[in-house]
Image (spheres, rainbow, N blue to C red):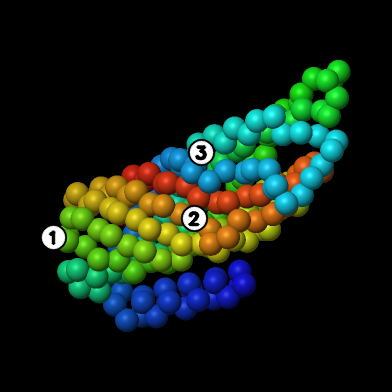
Amino acid sequence: MPYLIWTTLLMTLGITCKAQSEGLKFYLQGGVNYNTGTIGVDSALSNAGQIIEDINSFNGWHAGITIREYRNSTQYLSFESIYAFNKTELIIGPSDSLSLPTFQTLSSQTIQLAISPGFRIFKLLRGQAGLNGVFQLNNTFQESFNSFKLGYRLGLGLDIFKLTADLAYNASFDPTLGIFNGIPLSNANSQFLLTLGYKF
């Protein structure tokens, strides 16, 4: 599946470049991630040895590049490639009351590739929706959950001269079940991304 997504994105981008290279715009972007879907305890499994007392998911950051191919004054196709970082802290309590709880940190380091058709109004406001592929780079995270997740992306944007601002919502279609340090967990990837960019 990851190879299929890569191939589709590259073929689409190649056709786009050949067909209308003068309509391509490149943006260097970065911003913050606000998590809305966090790692949670998988209720379908049980573990008598350890108990999750609390799960704290911290907001992260992202940076990358966006390429937009403007078909005309109102329509465009966007290809986005970003690196995103988030971390989650798990407070694990033992089954007996004699031991102290332990703290475990699970970091998520991903490459996210998105392709989205969009429209714009007065060359100022934008709206888009498409597919988003998430490739997990962190080995510990890969051992607990799948290394690839396919989802969807919804976004709104604002363009002022060479500056651009975007608010996007990325979410996976289905949660992933996994095991971390013997604890059954579920991971539902969803977050808001607030991004600022510069056209070059």
x and y percentages locating residue 35 in the rendered image: 49, 42
SS at badge 2: strand
Determine crowd level at label 1: few under 14, some 14-19, many 20+ residues with C-alpha closer than 10 A.
few
The one nearer the camera, 150 or 8, is 150
The residue that appears at 63% across and 34% down in the rendered structure is 55
The residue that appears at 41% across and 66% down in the rendered structure is 130
Label 2 is placed on what type of residue?
Ala
Residue that carries the numbered disc 3 in the rendered image: 60
* Left-right relation of 143 to 150: right
x and y percentages locating residue 17 in the rendered image: 36, 75
Determine which of the numbered discs, if any, sits on residue 122 in the image.
1
The residue that appears at 18% across and 55% down in the rendered structure is 124
Residue 73 shows in this picture = yes
The one nearer the camera, 115 or 92, is 92
Q: Is residue 83 above or below residue 73?
A: above
Farthest-out residue, left: 122
Q: Are marks 3 and 2 in contact (CB under 8 Å)?
A: no
x and y percentages locating residue 154 in the rendered image: 38, 58
SS at badge 1: loop
Label 1 is placed on what type of residue?
Phe
Q: Are marks 1 and 3 in contact (CB under 8 Å)?
A: no
Determine crowd level at label 3: few under 14, some 14-19, many 20+ residues with C-alpha closer than 10 A.
some
- Disc 1 or disc 2, which is closer to the eye? 2
Q: Is residue 114 above or below residue 88?
A: below
Determine which of the numbered discs, if any, sits on residue 171 in the image.
2
C-alpha span from label 1 to label 3: 33 Å
